[in-house]
Image (spheres, grey):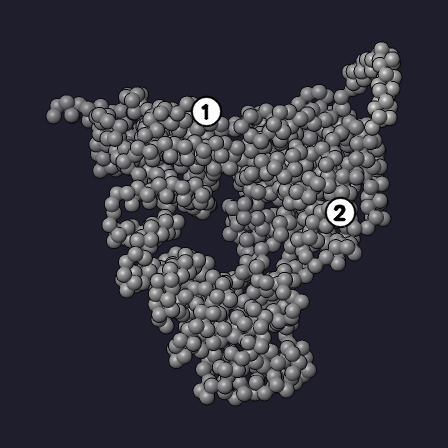
Amino acid sequence: MIKLSIRRIFLISTWYLVLGTLPLFAAQEDNKLVTLSKQIIEAKTTAELYRPFEELKDLYFSRTMIKSEGGIPLPAGKENKFSDFVGFLESLSSKKNTLEPFTNYYIALSRYQQLKYLEETQNWDEYFAKGNDYRSKISEAAAKTVASIAVSEPLHLYANLILWQFHRDQQDVFHEAALADLMNSSLEYAKDATDIIPIKEVADRLVAYGEKGKSKELYKIYVDRLIASDIKDEALSNTALEFYKQGNLELSQGIYDVYIGKVVAYPKEEAIPILIEIAKNFAYSAASAVGGLGGKDEGLKDAFYAEKVFKKIEELGKEEAFNEELIYLRAFNLEKSKEYAQAKDAYLNLVQRFPSSAYADEADFKTAIIYTYILRDIKNGRAYFEKLSQKETLTPQGIASLYHLGLLSQWEENFSAAREYYKKLIEKAKEGFPQTFGLAQERMKEIEETKPIEYNLKTFLDLSLKDENTMYDMSKLDLKASLYRVSKGQELNIAASVYLPQTGCLQMEVQYFWSGDLGKTKPAFDEASFNTSFTDPGTKVINLVVVSPSGVLDRSIALIDMR
Amino acid sequence: MKSNTSKTKSHKSGVTSHKPILLVACGLWLVACLLGAASRPKPAVYIQKLKNSRYRLMVNKKPYIVKGVCYNPIPIGENHEYDWWSDPNKPWLVDGKLMQEMGVNTVRVYQSGENPEAVKNVIRDLYQLYGIRMIMGHWLGFWEYPCPGYGENDFKERVKKEVLSMVDLYKDEPGILFWVLGNENNYSFSGQVNPWSSDEIDKEPEPQTQKFMRGKIYYSFVNELAKEIHKIDPNHPVALGNGELIGLDIAAKFSPDVDLVACIIYRGKTFGNLFKSLKVTFDKPIALTEFGADAYDAYLNKEAQNMQAFFLESQWRQIYQNLAGNKEGAGNCLGGTIFEWTDEWWKHNESDPESWKVHDIESNWSNGSYYFDIKAPKNMNMNEEQFGIVALSQDLENGINKRLPRKAYYVVREFWKNPTLGNINKKKDKK
C-alpha cells in the first residue's frame, strides 16, 4: 500500500513537473490519469500497453472538437491539449525508455491531429509558427516507432498508417512510398496475427481516402479470416448488416458476397426471402433519397449491388420469386440509378403480371415517359400515354398523359390534335389538378396566339425528340432531388450537376433552361438548383437543358412521385 | 552476281588505297569538331537533363530555381490596357526592392509592352538593380476579337511575326530567363472557351475528334514558333504555356521542340500527381508559371491573408519536393511564379471604369480545392481581384499605390530561406 502511494505521488508529481502548471483536468479525470499512468509504468508486456495508452489519448483528445469542415470555432469551454499530451508522453518515455515505441506513436498522432485541428479551426498563428516543427515531429516520431517495434505488433501498423495519412493529406511526393510501406506491413502483420481488427482499421482508413483497391485487398484478408473462424451464417449476416449500418458498404458487400454464396445453397424457399431482405437494404426505394440529400430511408444505397442481388433472386426463383412490390422496387431502383431501358422493362413486367396493381398507372406513365423522352421512341411512348388517357376514370397519370399527348402533337405542329387533348384535359382537370391545368392553359394560349412552345420546353423537346440530337444523351448532366416521393405541399430540392470540361479560371457561364412540372417555382436561368412543392398528385416530370456560350451541353430529366 | 562482286571488290580496293588519307581527314575533322564544341559557349540559359528524366534550369552554368511572381502592376483605377512599362513613376523599382527582400529572383510577364525601349528599361532595372530575371510571355492572340484564329494561316503568320519580333528585340537582354508561348490557350480545344474552328473541324461531328483537331493545329503552331525562336535565339528556352495538363498528350506528338511546359494550375493545397503525370504524358521539365490563392474569404466576406499564406506555403513545399535535387520527387520541376505580385482592381468588371477604382469582393469563379470558403453563395469562392501577395493601398507613395505585403509575402519568404519538406526519416523496419 505504502509502495503504491509513493508511486502515486511520484506519478502526480511527474505530471505537475511535466506541465509546470496546476492540473488541467477535473479531479475525476486526474484520478484516471494517475491510474492509467500507473498501468503503463507497471505493464509487463507490450500487449498490456495498448488499452491504457488509448484511454490516455482519449482523455486528452476528448477535449477537442475536430470538425471536418473548416472555420468552425470550438464551443466555449473546450480546449485542445495536444501539446500537453506530447509533454506528458515525453516525460513518460524519459522515465521508462521501453515505452518509446508507444510514446513516439502517440506523439506523432498528437501532432498529426493538432495540425489538422489548427487548419480546421484556422488557428494560423500557431500553424505558421509551429507547423514545420509538428510536421517534422510526425515523420520522425512515427518512423522511430516503425523502426523500434516488431511488424507483428499492431502499433507498427498504426505508425505506418499515421505516416501514410500525413503524407496523403499533403499529397506530397512521399505518399506513394508511405502507402507501399503501409500495405507491406499490413500484409506482413496479417500472416501470423491472431487479432485481425487492425487490418480492418487500416482498410477503413484507406476507404475513407478513396484507396478502394488497397482497402479491398485488406478487407478480403479480414473477411477470409472471419470465414476461417467457423463463423455461423447468421453471425456472418449480422456482421454484414452491422457494417452496412455503420456505412461501410465496401466491407458489408464483401461479407454479403460470402454470405450470399452460402445462402444460394439453401432450399429456394429459405434463400429467396433472405436475398430479398439484402436487396431491399441496398435498393433505392420510394422513401429514400438519391444522392444523399436526405430522404426518409437514411440507409446508404447502392443500386448496382441491389440489382446484382435481384439477379440472384431471379436466377433462383425465376419470375415467380418477384411479387408486385418487389418488381416495383426493382423498377424504381433501376429508374433512380438511371438504368432507364431496364427500368422500363421492369415497369412493363409489373403491369403485364399485375395489371390491376396499385402501381400500374405509375408504371405505364413512366414507361411512356422513358420511351418518349429518354429512348426517343415517340410511337411506343404515345401508345402508353393513350392507354392511360383513354381510361374511363382518369387517374393523375391519365391527366398528365393528356398533357403529354397534347404537347407531342403541338411540337409536331398538329395543332388541332393538340387542342383536342388540352381541351379534354382542361375539362377533366379543372378540379384537383391545378398545376397540370395551368400548364395546359399555357400551351392552349400558345396555339391560339400562334406562338411557339415556351422556349425552355421547346428546347428540351427538340433535343429529346429530334434524331439529329442523339448526342445529347444525358451523360454530361445529372439531376437529383432531395426526395423522390412527396406529399402535397412538401418542399423538395432539385439540383443539377453539369460535367464541364476543365477550363481553369476561365470559367464558363452556363444557363439552366428548366421546364416541365416545376411546381410552385419558376427557377431563373442562372439557378442550378431550386426548392419547390407540388399540389397535384401523380408523377412529375422535370426537364432541364444546360447551355454554354458555345451551345447546348446536355439535357436531363427527373421524375418525382406525389401521392 | 559476278559483275556485282567485281564491282564491290574494285570499290573496296579503292577504299584501301586511300585509307591513310581518309583516316587523317577523319581525325582532323574529329579534332576540329571537339575543339569547336569546347570553344562553343553554353547558352546563357538552358535546361540540363539529368538521369531518370530529371531536369534543372541552368543560368550562367549554375542551377537556378525559379522563385518568382507573375507581374502586372496595374494601378488602382486603370485596367489591362494601361501601359505600366512606360509609367513615369517606375513601380518596378519599389516592387523590385520588395521582391529582392523576399527572395524573388524571377518575374513573369504575360506579354511585353508596345514601346521596346520602355520594356528594355524595365528588364534592365529589375536585373541590374535587384538581380531579378524576366520570363517573357506572348498571348499568341488568344484574346483577339472575335476569337483566336488558329485555324487561319493569316492569323498565324501575323502572330508569328509578333512573337519573333519580340524575341529579336529582347533576346540579348541579360535579364531574360525564357519565353512562354500562350497561357491557357489549350482550354479552347473543348470549344467552350474562346471558341475557334476551321472548315475541317466544322465538318467533324464527333466532339472528341474536334478537340484533337484543335489541339493538333494549335500545338503544331506552337512547335513551329519554338523552332523559329531557337534559330534566332539559342540562348533561352521556349516554354509551352498550358492550362493544367489538358491536351499535353497531343502536345507530345506535335510540340516536340518546346523545351519546357509552363503550367497554369489552381489545385488548392497541392498539385496532386501533376509532376508524375507530366512525365508519363509529355516528358519535359515544368515551371508552374501561374498558381496561388486569393486572399479573400468569400464565405465569411472578409480578407483572409492567412488562408492565402496557408495555400502558398503548401504549394511551395510541393514545388521544392519535385525539384531535380530532391531524389524522392519527380525531379522535373524548375520552380514557379506565384499568381500574383499585386492585386489588380480592374478584373471583376473590365468594361466598367468606375469599378476599377473599387476593390470588388464578388467572386468570379468557383474552385472546390480552395475549401475554406467553398460554402460561399453558389460556391463562388475565387476572388480574382485579391490574388496579390502584396495589396494595393489607395494612398500614393512615390506616385504609385502604396504596397502592403500580405502574410503570404512573409510566409513564402521564410519558406524560401529554410525550405522544410517533411521527408520521412526512413529507418529499417524492425521485423
Give SS at disc 2. helix
Q: Residues within 10 Å of mark 1 (few under 14, many from 20)?
A: few
Judged by depth in the image, the label closer to the viewer, 1 or 2, is 2
x, y percent for residue A4: 15, 25
Query: The residue tagged with tag 1: helix, strand or loop?
Result: loop
Q: Position of residue A56 (x, y in %)?
A: 28, 34
**Considering only vertical position in the picture, is A478 above or below A448?**
above
Per the rendering, the mark at residue B217 is: 2
- Label 1 sits on residue: B425
Task: Residue at 50%, 36% (x, y): give it.
Answer: A170
Residue at (37, 72) in percent of width and height: A324
Residue occupying image coordinates x 24% and y 45%: A230
- Residue B401 percent coordinates (x, y): 69, 39
Q: Amino acid at mark 1?
A: Asn
Packing grade of label 2 (10 A; few <14, some 14-19, many >=20) is some
B39 vs A154: above or below: above
- Asked where in the image residue A509 lies, by quadrant, the reply is bottom right
